[in-house]
Structure formats: C-alpha cells, structure tokens
Amino acid sequence: MLIEERVLAIRPETSRDWTDVELLACVVAYRDLQREEQGGARVNKTEKRNSVLRNALSSRSAGAYEFRMANISAVLKELGLPTLGGYLPRGNVGAKVSAKIISMINLVWQRQNVPELPTTDHQELQTRVLSARQKLKDNPAALPPINLLSGTRTQSTTTRFLRDPNVIAWVLQVAAGVCEVCAEPAPFVRDDGEPYLEVHHVRPLAEGGPDSADNAIAVCPTCHRRLHYGYDKEALRGGTLEKIARLKNYPKVGEKFL
Ligand SMILES: [Zn+2]
Ligand SMILES: [Zn+2]
C-alpha cells in the first residue's frame, strides 16, 4: 500500500462531502422524531440514530449524525420553525449545505409557504419572484424573509453575446440625448457628462436579431424596461419599427453561438 493510500484510508470520514441521500436521511429522521414528540409519544433518539446509521448513513459515525442533526436545528431555528430538544443548533454548515438543507426541509415538512431559493440566473429569478409574489398574496401577513445565503457568490458559466461598441456609439449619437421611443430627453446626465440612454435591440439578440444599427435604438430606462416587461411590449415594438426609418423588422429565429 502506498503512503498516500494509507493516508487516505485513515482520513476522517468527515472530509468526504455529504451526499444528498445522506443529508436527506437526517432531515427525514429529524422530522420523524419531531412528529413523534408532537404526538406525545416517548421519543427514542438513539433507536432512530442506529436505524439511520445502519441504512443511508452506513459509512458515517454516530458523531457525524449528531452533528448533522444539530445543523438541521440551526437551519430550522433560522427559518423560525420549532426544533427538537436534545439537538442544540449548530451552525457553520456553509452556504451550499445550508441551501440544500433548506430545500430538503421544505420538501420533507411540506411547508405551506415554501420560500423560493436564491439564484444567479436572471430569467429563473423572475420566475421565482412571480411564484413568491403569488405565495405572498395567499399569505399577506407573512414575516419578512430570512435570506440565509445573503452575500453568497457562486461561479457560473454563462453564454453572452458579443456587443459592438461602434453600434452603441452610433445609435447614441443619432439619438442625441432624446429617447427614441417616448421622445423625452434622457432622465439624467452620466458622470462622464453624456446623457443617460440605453441601447436596446428591437429584435433581441437571443431571438436571432443582429447587433447592428438597423436593429438598435437608444431609449430611456423606463421605455427600455417597458420594451422588455410591459404588457404592451409588442405594440410598442411595432410602433417603434414604424416610426424609425432606419430600423428593419427582423424575424425571430433560433439562437446562434460563436
Ligand atoms: Zn423613453
Ligand atoms: Zn433591451
């Protein structure tokens, strides 16, 4: 046996990341114990622990199990949910594990007002905001949310379109500080002295529109948001195409990747 192999063999098990199955087994065990306690039954924590250790946690120690149960107490406490006596909350689980435990708690507890999980994906965020707003409408007295993952950064691979600075500059030059949709002057002056307008693609790049002057307009932030999110965005788009002679109505096609 190589030295490295021997070192690996005696490495404490805690150095190995917990699998979802292992975490979920602890969350389920916690919920079972809590149900028993709430039902007035005598709760046998040791028996439950041994059963979990025999099954899903067969490669973990009793200490590791106890530690996870204390982690679950910490997350429940943060969520404002009751904890089991005997498992004093122990935090410092790390953002990733914490997020996992939260989603598992939501799943296992089948909570009425399951919070939406944070995300870096802009599109996904909009979807989750919509769903969170619906839940708030059903439960207007909900307490302010606790974001356990506040300040968390995560690395993600994103695909972005190349943008041509010459197109942006030319369109801004033509607009001369006036929104090409509402014809109002730019709402403020940038710190470099230029009027603040944003360049929008009339046919979005993601829908196959080109990054060219005949597909780009300079607009104020309000009109820009409206073009993206307004109930009347299609009508606004049509009106803009009619009004500005240089624009071409590009059809919607599939995505292109470079
Ligand atoms: Zn405008
Ligand atoms: Zn835009």
Image: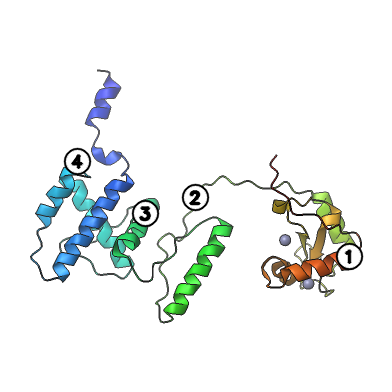
Residue under label 2, please give it.
154
Picture disc at residue 100: 3
Few, some or many C-alpha atoms within 10 Å of disc 4 (few <14, some 14-19, many ≥20)? Answer: few
Using the image, determine if residue 59 lies above or below residue 234.
Answer: above
Mark 4 or 1, nearer chain start: 4
Q: Alpha carbon of mark 3 to alpha carbon of mark 1: how far?
A: 51 Å
Which residue: 54% across, 61% down?
Answer: 125
Using the image, determine if residue 72 lies above or below residue 11.
Answer: below
Total marks shown come to 4
Residue under label 1, please give it.
244
Callout 1: CB less than 8 Å from ligand 1: no
Few, some or many C-alpha atoms within 10 Å of disc 3 (few <14, some 14-19, many ≥20)? Answer: some
Which residue: 66% across, 68% down?
Answer: 229
As drawn, the residue found furthest toward the top would be 1
Q: Are marks 2 and 4 in contact (CB under 8 Å)?
A: no
Which label sits in the foreground, 2 or 1?
1
Residue under label 4, please give it.
58
Task: Report which quarter residue 100 is drawn in.
Answer: bottom left
As drawn, the residue found furthest toward the bottom would be 141
Mark 2 or 4, nearer chain start: 4
Which label sits in the foreground, 2 or 4?
4
